[in-house]
Image (cartoon, helix red, strand yellow):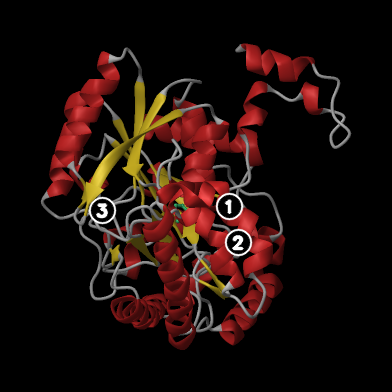
């Protein structure tokens, strides 16, 4: 235990929390994400929020869902309101295998699917199963803020791998593996989001997929493939999953949160058989069983409703919003660069040199627009020169107005940096 931790362990508590000294060491790694810290301010109606990544549910067939919920409870209430299997309901696991065929995972075995409380829980379980304190998790640079939260909570060290417009760079992966191992550290997982990356907005190219799978097979590193946005490509189904190249070397995570809705909190892990056994045990220890009513509702939605047409309508709604943000960036922020998403919710913006997205944020919120600073998506404090813009939620008109407001803040900030140098905001 480090001196720092011993110190906090010895304290008698604080006025805010009399139990402060009693927490386990890992509890001190928990912190509110930068996104959560923003929630109260950006939810004001006058602020255009390009910050949160909430799916846009305006086109969800709520009347049909209400009918469906009513008939589910009337006809199968006793089962729907009961505990279920720790692995998840067999009927839904079969349907999940069908959903995964769109990702190039053909002939999936329902017995190797574990249903979880969102893919977030699967991420947590996988980290619990594989990561001891101090172990290294490799992840893209930048990476999903919610995964960083899990890795921190489990005392992992995250090492970032460079990306470009085609996703993770295989050579950077190889070099990082060699460097980390030369430092005597143990790599446990490669965590990756190949499709419509959160927050980078890029997609791993078809050429790189077999290369990444092969490097990890050769180096004996388990891949954790996180794919909640896969079905939300604007013009096409996703490229084949890494799982399809390396069935024994990949644990694939899927979710109904973005292709349907997050309300039932249902996701899944599709794992090699031995890992699936451990996942079930870990999940039973954590939650006993995933929500039965949630699983049955989703199973019914997949059977009774034309879910794939719904996915297509989500795609065109998000594409329209993506076009709005890219057009507005072109028009209002030529001094920045950004990624061009082929699907999903996000674009990753690089600010002019010297600008700091984190310190600029209060000024942006005062100008009634919000974003997430790039620093939220790094383990090591990098990212201040970037910001993530989400285009999933506001209307195209509001998106344009949000980018226009952002441009006034960026221009004012750039003027100050040009005049006083990059460090001015630290003294401000
Ligand atoms: C990359 C990524 N992984 C996982 C999740 C968690 O999704 P779920 O709702 O399935 O827990 C999200 C949610 O935003 C995400 O963006």
Where is residue 311 drawn, in percent x and y? 38, 75
Query: How many marks do you count on the picture?
Result: 3
Rendered view: 327 above or below 266: below
Rendered view: 282 above or below 237: above
Q: Nearer the viewer, mark 2 or mark 1?
A: 1
User: Going 29% across and 21% down the picture, which residue do you hit?
Assistant: 180
Residue 191 visible from this viewpoint: no
Badge 1 residue CB within 8 Å of ligand 1? no
> Mark 3 to mark 1: distance in Å?
53 Å
Where is residue 86 drawn, in percent x and y? 58, 42
Q: Which residue is mark 2?
A: 294
Where is residue 403 drawn, in percent x and y? 43, 76
Q: Nearer the viewer, residue 198 or 37?
A: 37
The residue carrying pointer 3 sits among few (fewer than 14), some (14 to 19) or many (20 or more) residues within 10 Å by Cα, namely many
User: Going 52% across and 81% down the picture, which residue do you hit?
Assistant: 60
Q: Nearer the viewer, mark 3 or mark 1?
A: 1
User: Going 36% across and 47% down the picture, which residue do you hit?
Assistant: 142
Q: Which residue is mark 3?
A: 105
Q: Which residue is mark 1?
A: 428
């Amino acid at each position: 235990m480090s001196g720092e931790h011993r110190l906090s362990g010895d304290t008698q508590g604080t006025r805010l929390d009399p139990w402060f000294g009693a927490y386990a060491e890992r509890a001190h790694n928990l912190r509110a994400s930068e996104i959560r810290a923003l929630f109260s301010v950006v939810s004001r109606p006058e602020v255009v929020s390009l910050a949160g990544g909430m799916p846009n549910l305006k086109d969800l067939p709520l009347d049909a869902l209400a009918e469906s919920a009513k008939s589910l409870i009337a006809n199968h209430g006793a089962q729907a309101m009961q505990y279920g299997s720790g692995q998840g309901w067999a009927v839904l696991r079969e349907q999940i295998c069908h959903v995964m065929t769109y990702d190039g995972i053909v002939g999936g075995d329902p017995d190797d699917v574990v249903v979880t409380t969102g893919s977030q829980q699967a991420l947590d379980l996988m980290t619990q199963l594989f990561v001891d304190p101090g172990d290294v998790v490799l992840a893209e640079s930048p990476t999903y803020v919610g995964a960083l939260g899990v890795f921190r909570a489990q005392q992992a060290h995250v090492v970032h791998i460079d990306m470009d417009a085609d996703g993770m760079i295989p050579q950077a992966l190889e070099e990082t593996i060699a460097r980390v191992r030369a430092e005597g550290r143990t790599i446990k997982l490669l965590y990756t989001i190949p499709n419509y990356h959160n927050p980078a907005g890029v997609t791993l190219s078809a050429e790189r997929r077999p290369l990444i799978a092969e490097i990890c097979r050769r180096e004996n590193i388990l891949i954790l493939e996180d794919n909640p946005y896969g079905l939300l490509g604007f013009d096409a189904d996703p490229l084949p999953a890494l799982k399809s190249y390396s069935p024994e070397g990949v644990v694939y995570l899927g979710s109904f949160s973005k292709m349907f809705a997050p309300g039932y909190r249902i996701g899944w892990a599709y794992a090699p058989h031995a890992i699936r056994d451990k996942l079930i045990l870990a999940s039973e220890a954590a939650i006993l069983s995933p929500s039965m009513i949630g699983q049955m509702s989703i199973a019914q939605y997949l059977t009774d409703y034309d879910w794939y047409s719904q996915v297509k309508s989500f795609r065109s709604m998000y594409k329209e919003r993506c076009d709005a943000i890219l057009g507005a960036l072109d028009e209002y922020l030529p001094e920045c660069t950004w990624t061009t998403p082929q699907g999903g919710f996000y674009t990753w913006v690089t600010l002019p040199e010297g600008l700091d997205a984190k310190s600029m944020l209060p000024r942006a919120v005062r100008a009634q627009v919000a974003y997430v600073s790039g620093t939220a998506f790094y383990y090591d404090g990098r990212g201040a020169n970037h910001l993530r813009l989400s285009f999933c939620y506001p209307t195209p008109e509001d998106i344009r107005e949000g980018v226009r407001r952002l441009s006034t803040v960026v221009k004012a900030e750039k003027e100050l940096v040009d005049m006083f140098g990059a460090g001015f905001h630290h003294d401000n």
